[in-house]
Amino acid sequence: MEIVHTISDLQTKLNALRQNNKSVGLVPTMGALHEGHLSLIKRCRTDNDVAVVSVFVNPTQFNNPNDLATYPRDLDADAALVNAEGVDLLFAPSPEDIYSNEEINHRFEFDFQGLDKVMEGKQRPGHFNGVVQIVSKLFQLTNPTRAYFGEKDFQQIAVIRLMVKTLGFNLDIIACPIIREASGLAKSSRNQLLSDDQKVLASNIFKVLKESLNFASKMSPLNLSQWVTENINAHKGLEVEYFEIVNADTLQTISDWNDASSVVGCVTVHCGNVRLIDNIKYKG
Ligand code: PAF
């Protein structure tokens, strides 16, 4: 596996690898790789002739400087994991390699058609502008046949699909299922920031989500939202930021189960200083 840091090295190596119309798969990541990422990488390796992984903690998608400063980083460990999966190219640029001063200091403009006004977008203004900025740049630089994203970031996938359509990228977005700890806790780079006790505590998020499936036919979406919020908050040390039951395509809250053919419940919970997200499919 080759590790490249600059755009020109990336393009030289990639041009050599993609000769004879070979398919290229891209897994964009922010590093601190875990089994969730590895499942995306394995799928990418299976589907494509050439597999590229990017590791870049994208500063423009963080709206909280402390969150950016404490985001876990370990390129050597990431490179060893990616190499073991048989990936061809690891792209690990620095912010200066990727962005001009102008790009880093001005919010990337994009019409999200409302997708940025709910849930993560509402709580983290500008977050999805940064995501679209970096993902569109990575797509331009690597021109992949397919790109892989985890369903834990459910809203992010919807935003990226819209971006692909709006900007006219010719590639497939492949959404891969959430990978969980044995306890049910969704795998996340941020789990590294949890103590052992907090990991046990945080496993209650999925326990409550899973239990809520039993009530989906008996309660209205609004009542079920309240039930989930109360039952997660009942665990001292967990605090729900939002739980919303939404149309999986538009991400708008539903008031009746018949409002959408595909319905998902999305949650963000604070466990100490760590912000954890998860979701569960109710329908579709
Ligand atoms: O999901 C992530 O890790 C990031 O948002 C992504 C897609 C790599 C863009 O920085």
Image: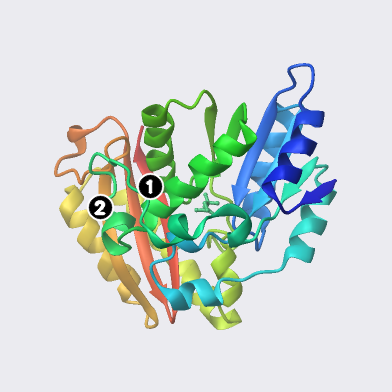
Q: Is residue 142 left or right of residue 225?
A: right
Residue 216 visible somewhere in the drawing: no
Q: Mark 2 points at which residue?
A: 118
Point out residue 23 in the picture as x, y percentages from the top left corner.
70, 24
Q: Residues within 10 Å of mark 1 (few under 14, many from 20)?
A: many
**What numbered label is drawn on residue 226?**
none
Residue position marked by numbered label 1 in the rendering: 155
User: Is the residue 164 above or below the residue 108 in the image?
Assistant: above
> Which SS class for mark 2?
loop
Label 1: element kind: helix
Examine the rendering and report whether any part of residue 280 can be seen: yes
The image quarter in which residue 254 lies? top left
Labelled pair 2, 1 in contact (Cβ < 8 Å): yes
Q: Position of residue 215 (x, y in %)?
A: 28, 50
Q: Quadrant of residue 72?
A: bottom right
The structure residue drawn at horizontal position 45% and vertical position 55%, both measured from the top left corner, is: 103
Q: Position of residue 97 (x, y in %)?
A: 63, 56
